[in-house]
Amino acid sequence: MFDIFAYSFIRNAFIAGTCVAIVAAVVGYFLIVRGLTFAGHSLAHIGFAGAAGAVFLGIHPVIGLLIFTIGSGVGIGFLARTLRERDIAIGVVTTFTLALGFLFLSLYRGYAEKAYSILFGTIVGISSLDSTVTLIFSILALAVLCFLFRPLLFSSVDPEVAQARGMPVRLLSVLFLVIVAITISISVQIVGVLLIFTLLVGPAATAIRIARTPLGAIALSIVLGIIYIWVGIYLAAITPLNFYPLNTVSLPISFCVATISFGVYLPVRLLSPLWLNRRRRELTAQPQPLAMQPEQAKMEPEVLRSSR
């Protein structure tokens, strides 16, 4: 059962996967509360264009992925003033960068194996250097999120009031999208850009429907993300499947993680109205203390509404 840990790439995959799961869980919570799930999905696809460009130029795909996702995140953050403008900006930037990706692949004369591996992820290619880089970027991203936690949460649940109080709402939005871009860039070797959405949204979407507070939802999201990654890596590592005609087929880690995430989210989504409705009635019946700050009073109802 534990023989797989004799291989260094498996150990590296668990280290990198744990780092990615923690960062993605925290980022995913804010993605849902801020209504930016479409942006996260688009940045993942934009990352493939950056990887294709890096392969064409002969550099490491992750470098191109970082440049494209961070640049696109900054562009989306500055172009969007309203929700409608944000969706338009995301669509325009995404289509343009994907077109660039197709151009880079068509110009490249070799077999762009590295670029295609970015699409689906691979645990075999994770080296000690990759896991170390992932750990460093994860610590940096978490440090920034901890520093921005209160203003980011306030601007997420009530951006109008936050802006009226003098908070740099647009700057916070840009910084958050940069963190999303970094999270996507360090996650591609685990689940790939096509299924990074699984780690960004799956654990957080489940946790928001169970936990009562933002910190509780983030903590539960981290636990779920780590479980998904660990079980997914283990299932992918113990294959190929040992029954005919699939005795030579290995399960992709992205498939394992996505299946586990969906399998956990579905029953929670179907059953959550039972306790969410009761929680809303409790909040309505409970008088608010006069000393409660406006952002505190709105925080839990907003989180409940975001989980509908």
Image (tube, rainbow, N blue to C red):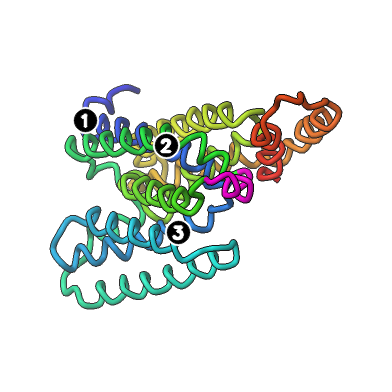
In space, the residues marked 2 and 1 are separated at their CA atoms by 33 Å
Q: Which residues are magenta?
A: 157-166
Q: Residue at x 53, y 58 (%)?
A: 38
Question: Which quadrant of the view contains residue 208?
Answer: top right
Label 1 sits on a secondary structure element that is: loop
Residue wearing tag 3: 77
Q: Is residue 158 magenta?
A: yes
The answer to whether mark 1 and mark 3 are in CB contact below 8 A is no
Dot 1, how many residues are within 10 Å of its Cα: few (below 14), some (14-19), or many (20+)? few
Along the horizontal axis of the image, is 301 left or right of 200? right
Q: Earlier in the sequence, mark 3 or mark 2?
A: 3
Q: Is residue 98 magenta?
A: no
What percent of the width, then of the height, locates residue 150? 51, 34
Q: Which of label 1 and label 3 is nearer to you?
A: 3
Question: Which quadrant of the view contains residue 24?
Answer: top left
Residue wearing tag 2: 145
Q: Residue at x 16, y 74 (%)?
A: 109
Q: Earlier in the sequence, mark 1 or mark 3?
A: 1
Whether residue 267 is visible to the viewer of this picture, yes or no, is no
Dot 3, how many residues are within 10 Å of its Cα: few (below 14), some (14-19), or many (20+)? many
Q: Residue at x 77, y 38 (%)?
A: 273
